[in-house]
Image (cartoon, rainbow, N blue to C red):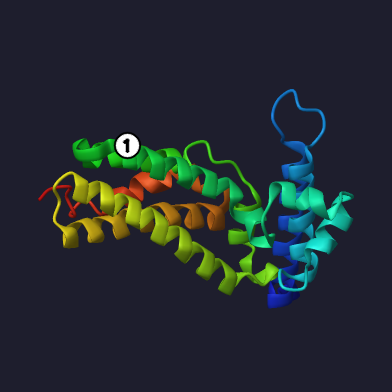
Amino acid sequence: MRCNNTPHARSWGRRAEARGTVRDMKSTGRAGRPKASSRETLAEAACELFLERGYDKTSVADITQRAGVSRSSFFNYFTSKSDVLWSGVDERIGHAIAALENLGAGADGDAVRGILLLVVRDFAPDPLALALRNSAAMGLQDELVRDTGLRLARLSAAVSSAAHASGVDVIRADIVGAAYAAAVLSSLRVWAEHGAGRGTPEAVLLDALGTIHDLPWAV
């Protein structure tokens, strides 16, 4: 029936799908782990509440109450609501930045691309992927734009610094840094928005890196 394709029906369907993804997050922990950790429980509770109430209307107290843990437990794992979404990616970006810094004067395009691929390699559905796919339902569009910009700036600066340290001129280094960083963040977003049918985020990033082949790592 046509009524099943109304905006309300599509929105309801997307929310139902997202709730199913939250349930999948609960049941697909690491092998040998029979019980979710407090960190995972908090992340699951936050995602459920963001879907039910929206991001802005969900407080840390709401999350801890739903998870059945204390407020101090929340701050043992996360610094803010936003950190619930970004902590996993931030850890990967932090490792990438450290690796880029260690390249020194020997940095080249292949080494940098290899490091950036590690940011998305074996990336499983997590709170950020759920938020990217359901940003409208969670009321997160503006928040995600701001938060993505912060990560984009950090990663771009690290790639640019690596390029410049290897002898690339400043303007080219900045352009390459911005392009490579955008490829990483855009690939995660596109992969999350398209769901499992898109393949792996690593495959999406490889395609994205191919689109900036005309920006060679050279002086």
**Residue 90 in the image: x percent, y percent?**
53, 49
State the residue in front, 213 or 34: 34
Residue at (82, 32) in percent of width and height:
35
**Residue 182 in the image: x percent, y percent?**
37, 58
> Which residue is at the far left?
219
| Amino acid type indicated by mark 1 | Asn
Task: Judge whether 11 appears above or below 76 on screen.
Answer: below
Q: Quadrant location of residue 102?
A: top left
Residue 43 shows up from this direction: no
**Residue 147 in the image: x percent, y percent?**
53, 64
Task: Judge whether 56 appears above or below 115 on screen.
Answer: below
**Residue 114 in the image: x percent, y percent?**
33, 37
Residue at (66, 56) in percent of width and height:
79
Q: From the image, which quarter does the N terminus lie in?
A: bottom right
- Residue 103 placement, left or right of 82: left
Residue at (67, 72) in percent of width and height:
139
Mark 1 Cα shell of 10 Å, populated few (<14), some (14-19), many (≥20)? few
Residue 174 shows up from this direction: yes
Residue bearing the label numbered 1: 102
